Image: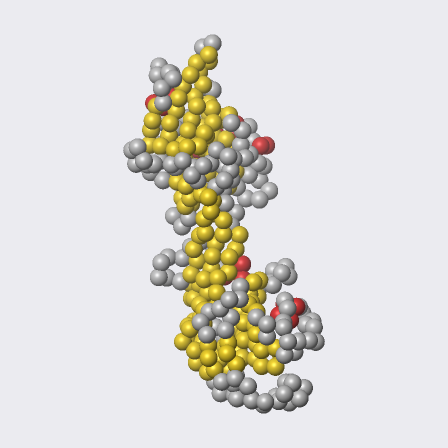
Amino acid sequence: MKKIIATLFFVFALSGCDDGDLISEEIDLADAEVEACSATESDILYKMTDRQAMILELVNLNTVLPAVPTLEGSPKIILIGNTTARLVYRVYNGEPVEANICASIQPPTPRVIEEWEATAGNLEITTIALKIPNTTPGFQGGERINELRHAIVVRNVSWSTPANPIIDPIVEFGNYDVAFTAPELNGYTNIANGCANGILFKKNAATAFAIDIDPALLDTTVLNTPKVGLISGNANTVTFLRFPEGTNLNLLTNENFCALLSSSTPSPAPSEVWLGEDGVAGVSGIVEVTTTTVGGVFTHEIRLKNVTLTENDGSLSFKIADDLLYGEYVP
């Protein structure tokens, strides 16, 4: 946060200040991290230094913060000073702790000796996805969406102070990072199942990883040589599905799960759908199958190379791996 320089013209009574002098405060919370109250369902974000605190209360915080990255140049805007958002700056006569902000019954010390309340202003929230390398064995070169970062800025803030009102053009509240539940693609066996319509899949209780594979890649007349296809339109479609909490796909037979995958109105319906991006020859979105045979039994080893999954609405994406062994399929 940039420094907000302001002279506070107020005289403390002995109960409010140790020396009773006029003081000049420099509000500087640039190095303080944004934190959330640890109480369940708390709607308060704050940052503190040795004597100061900036507190932001957002009603229904978990639903107000964007669930996906915002478009460039188009932050989410919330008006300050209404029933949705409240911004307060405080000075204490000692070092504050979380309980001074979050507890319903606050400790008696340190005491608040100065408080400003924002009466107007535009709260802007810009959200981006933070990615980290996927270090899981077999996923080299891949990424994981680790957190969503909410950069919070308040513009044209009108402060109500004990002395004169103050207008500040910008208050950079800071970054609030929220953990993201990324798709897990390693929680499956190495064996893929097949549907009559050509869809291959692996599943566990609440997720599934499927490929609507081009039949040419399963040609059993070409052995021991990789056959290569690209994700393209409806060919070699790669899909990750997450289902609502409480779903147990293991209760479905393979036949019933194949019907679910093919249905335009599946039940249960997935809560998330991630699709493989169309490929570029020799570069990305590659599906590779090598077929071998032992004793007349054909085995298809399937690999995904430089495949990127994008959430159905296009808001989030990540690269799976340089070269992922999807699994083996035995018809």
Q: Can residue 167 be seen in this view?
A: yes
Q: Which residue is drawn at 70% across and 73% down?
A: 107
Residue 330 in the figure: left or right of residue 234: right
Residue 186 in the figure: left or right of residue 219: right
Q: Which residue is drawn at 57% across and 76% down?
A: 90
Residue 50: name its quadrant: bottom right
Residue 149 drawn above or below residue 97: above
Residue 324: name its quadrant: top left
- How far across and how far down the image is residue 38, in percent? 62, 60
Residue 219 in the figure: left or right of residue 140: left
Residue furthest out toward the left? 281
- How far across and how far down the image is residue 256, in percent? 52, 30
Q: Which residue is drawn at 35% across and 14% down?
A: 221
Residue 255 drawn above or below residue 151: above
- How far across and how far down the image is residue 253, in percent? 55, 28
Given residues 276 and 320, the one toward you in this image is 320
Q: Which residue is drawn at 51% across and 25% down?
A: 191
